[in-house]
Image (cartoon, rainbow, N blue to C red):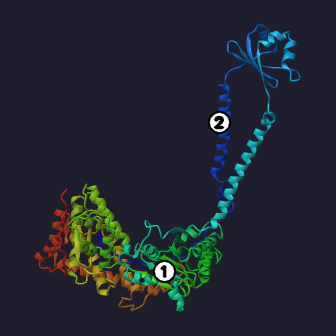
């Protein structure tokens, strides 16, 4: 069971970097580099196999050649005397015999004597020999030497080829080892219209785009700035919550300026070999300078840009060497280099101060979560290629999604299109978008998770308690929807959303939110004289919120306006006595909120029963139906804005 409220950005604690375990230089990976890995032995086996196949093919062809029979010279003489041989071809000491019946045989003669003399010694007369056609074929010197040397040369040539092939593989592996120091940055060509992004593709972030326009102007016309003695910032760091469009904005700057865009992640600088990261930094800056004017973009720079000297291994680890090289390269820039370095992070609190000093990343652009108008513009961008139904009102969706980032809004539109396609419809309706909001916030519906009659009643009263207390307390957010259909890990949920985006939260709003979140726990306790595991998430949320009020926001009446640091191993910013006081204040805030929630439910018990009964019957109550219940029981709903649209499921 959960209350879905607008998201609040959280600042993660600073964590100490852990020293990397050292790895032997020549391990499995070193052997792979030296011998080319599995591909080396695979190529060797392939070469031997091809050679054997060629030899087998040659033998097979020879076996299917025209058959011939080798006969003794005495038989040749007898056949010549008998008139059986029609033609003799002499090729050196080899004889090819063609008989009158067209059969072919071979024989050999004495190399030192001619054919007539040889046959005469076997009793063949000149008259008998004259009946046979004799052809003498001279053997060329090249052919003679080839036949003489081929049995020796062919194995030698094969062995030489094999050694050349293997040495080439080892050389390739060695070159691959040397290429570790080369940059792995991905380049976006400004002439590539398919990958080009401009400010027209980035909705919202108006202040950030205005801040970056001067960078675009400098890259387009640097002479205007240099002539007047102005120096454009060397480094621009984009800071903001995940999904707010930092990388997209950096690409848009390159697209607007029409310059090459070199993008790389901070983690890609770090390898197992010492010095590789620094070498890649040098190579990246060298390539970018050759392509100037250009932009270097380092995403998630906190992977290498954390505070130095915080590790166990001193200042010589690979990450710190990479950071030092980045600092050196940025200091080496000249005013006419025309190379701008951009970086993005959602953890600016852990960055090394040397990165943020003037002359390096001295321009900081903060990208906040989009407000309602920005959300509507972002939704329009993501809806360009989606057929929308006539009932779609993106302004309503923007109102229902406070705290959503640009990435979450993209996911929302995509989920709506998936829902429409799953139900075999060709248009995305408002109902699809409304369902997608809850899917992105809480997860998909768990229709197979069936509640028993008792669990359904308990869940209905739990969610009714949330909704009732939130509607009565003046500073709590208004209720937009109540449901007892399971989503994600929640058995039910109450969707509370403010009418307007909040940049700040007051103490009264915090106290009313805690009381509204405790409404489900109090309803269970009062009506069933027992509590279940359902409010476990609610208790975690209010405990963290109450502690933040005391420790971070100075909203404790007893401890006063003091911000206490986080207690960590080896870092105790306050004493045990103060810790006890903080725990007591957190308990007091929660206890007082519980008393307020119990008072509201006791005074409006009839409204609680009416809401729970409607939930048991329909399982889901939208804001219009909920407010009718409140008005019928004498409670005035909070001021609402005009939406001008009814949310109804489409007819399938």
From the viewer's perspective, is the residue at label 2 or at label 1 nearer? 1
Mark 2 and mark 1: Cα distance apart in space: 62 Å
- Residue 555 rendering spot, x and y as whole percentages: 36, 88
- Mark 2 and mark 1 lie on one chain; the one further toward the N terminus is 2
- Above or below, comparing residue 287 to residue 130 in the picture: below
Residue lying farthest to the top in this orientation? 82
Task: Compare residues 215 and 119 and report the one nearer the observer.
Answer: 119
Residue appearing at x 68%, y 34% in the figure: 55
Label 2 environment density (alpha carbons within 10 Å; few <14, some 14–19, many ≥20): few
The x and y percentages for residue 14 are 50, 78
Image quadrant for the C terminus?
A: bottom left
Name the disc covering residue 220, or none: 1
The residue indicated by pointer 2 is: 53
| Location of residue 492 (image quadrant) | bottom left
Secondary-structure class at tag 2: helix
How many numbered marks have been drawn onto this rendered protein structure? 2
Closest to the observer: 567 or 414? Answer: 414
Looking at the picture, how far across and down is residue 609, in whole percent? Answer: 16, 70
On the image, which quarter does residue 119 sit in? top right
């Amino acid at each position: 069971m959960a209350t879905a409220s607008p998201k609040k950005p959280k600042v993660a604690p600073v964590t100490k970097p852990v020293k990397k375990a050292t790895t032997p230089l020549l391990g499995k990976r070193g052997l792979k580099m030296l011998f080319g890995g599995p591909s080396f032995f695979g190529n060797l086996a392939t070469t031997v196999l091809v050679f054997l196949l060629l030899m087998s093919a040659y033998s097979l062809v020879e076996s299917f050649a025209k058959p011939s029979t080798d006969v003794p010279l005495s038989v040749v003489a007898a056949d010549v005397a008998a008139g059986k041989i029609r033609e003799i071809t002499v090729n050196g000491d080899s004889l090819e015999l063609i008989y009158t019946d067209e059969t072919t045989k071979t024989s050999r003669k004495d190399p030192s004597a001619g054919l007539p003399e040889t046959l005469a010694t076997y009793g063949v007369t000149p008259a008998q020999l004259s009946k046979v056609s004799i052809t003498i074929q001279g053997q060329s010197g090249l052919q003679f030497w080839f036949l003489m040397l081929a049995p020796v040369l062919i194995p030698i040539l094969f062995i030489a080829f094999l050694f050349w092939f293997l040495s080439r593989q080892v050389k390739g592996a060695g070159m691959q080892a040397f290429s570790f120091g080369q940059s792995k940055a991905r380049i976006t060509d400004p002439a590539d219209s398919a990958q080009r992004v401009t400010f027209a593709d980035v909705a919202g972030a108006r202040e950030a785009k205005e801040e970056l326009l001067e960078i675009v102007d400098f890259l387009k016309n640097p002479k205007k700035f240099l002539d007047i003695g102005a120096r454009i910032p060397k480094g621009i760091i984009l800071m903001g919550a995940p999904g707010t469009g930092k990388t997209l904005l950096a690409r848009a700057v390159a697209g607007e300026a029409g310059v090459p865009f070199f993008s790389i992640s901070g983690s890609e600088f770090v390898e197992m070999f010492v010095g590789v990261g620094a070498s890649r930094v040098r190579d990246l800056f060298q390539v970018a300078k050759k392509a100037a004017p250009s932009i270097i973009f380092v995403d998630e720079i906190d992977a290498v840009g954390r505070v130095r000297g915080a590790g166990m291994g001193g200042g010589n680890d690979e990450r710190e060497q990479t950071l030092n090289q980045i600092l050196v390269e940025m200091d080496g820039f000249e005013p006419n280099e025309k190379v701008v370095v951009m970086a993005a992070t959602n953890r600016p609190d852990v960055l090394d101060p040397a990165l943020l000093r003037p002359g390096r990343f001295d321009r900081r652009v903060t990208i906040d979560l989009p407000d309602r108008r920005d959300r509507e513009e972002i939704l329009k961008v993501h809806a360009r290629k989606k057929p929308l139904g006539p009932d779609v009102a993106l302004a309503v969706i923007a109102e229902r999604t406070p705290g959503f980032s640009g990435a979450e809004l993209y996911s929302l539109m995509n989920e709506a299109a998936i829902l429409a396609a799953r139900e075999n419809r060709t248009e995305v309706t408002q109902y699809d978008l409304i369902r997608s909001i809850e899917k992105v916030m809480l997860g998909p519906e768990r229709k197979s998770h069936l509640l028993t009659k008792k669990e359904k009643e308990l869940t209905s009263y739990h969610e009714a308690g949330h909704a009732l207390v939130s509607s009565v307390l003046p500073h709590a957010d208004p209720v937009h929807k109540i449901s007892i259909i399971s989503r994600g890990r929640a058995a039910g949920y109450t969707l509370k959303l403010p009418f307007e985006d909040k940049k700040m939260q007051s103490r009264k709003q915090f106290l009313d939110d805690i009381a509204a979140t405790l409404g489900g726990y109090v309803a269970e306790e009062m009506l069933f004289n027992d509590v279940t595991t359902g409010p476990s998430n609610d208790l975690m949320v209010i405990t963290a919120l109450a502690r933040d009020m005391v420790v971070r926001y100075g909203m404790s009446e007893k401890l006063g306006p003091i911000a206490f640091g986080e207690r960590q191993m080896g870092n105790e910013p306050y004493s045990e006595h103060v810790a006890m006081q903080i725990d007591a204040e957190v308990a007091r805030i929660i206890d007082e909120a519980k008393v307020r929630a119990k008072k509201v439910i006791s005074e409006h018990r009839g409204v609680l029963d009416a809401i729970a009964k409607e939930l048991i019957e329909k399982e889901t109550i939208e804001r219009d139906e909920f407010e009718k219940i409140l008005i019928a029981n004498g409670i005035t709903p909070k001021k609402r804005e005009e939406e001008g649209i009814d949310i109804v499921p489409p007819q399938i």
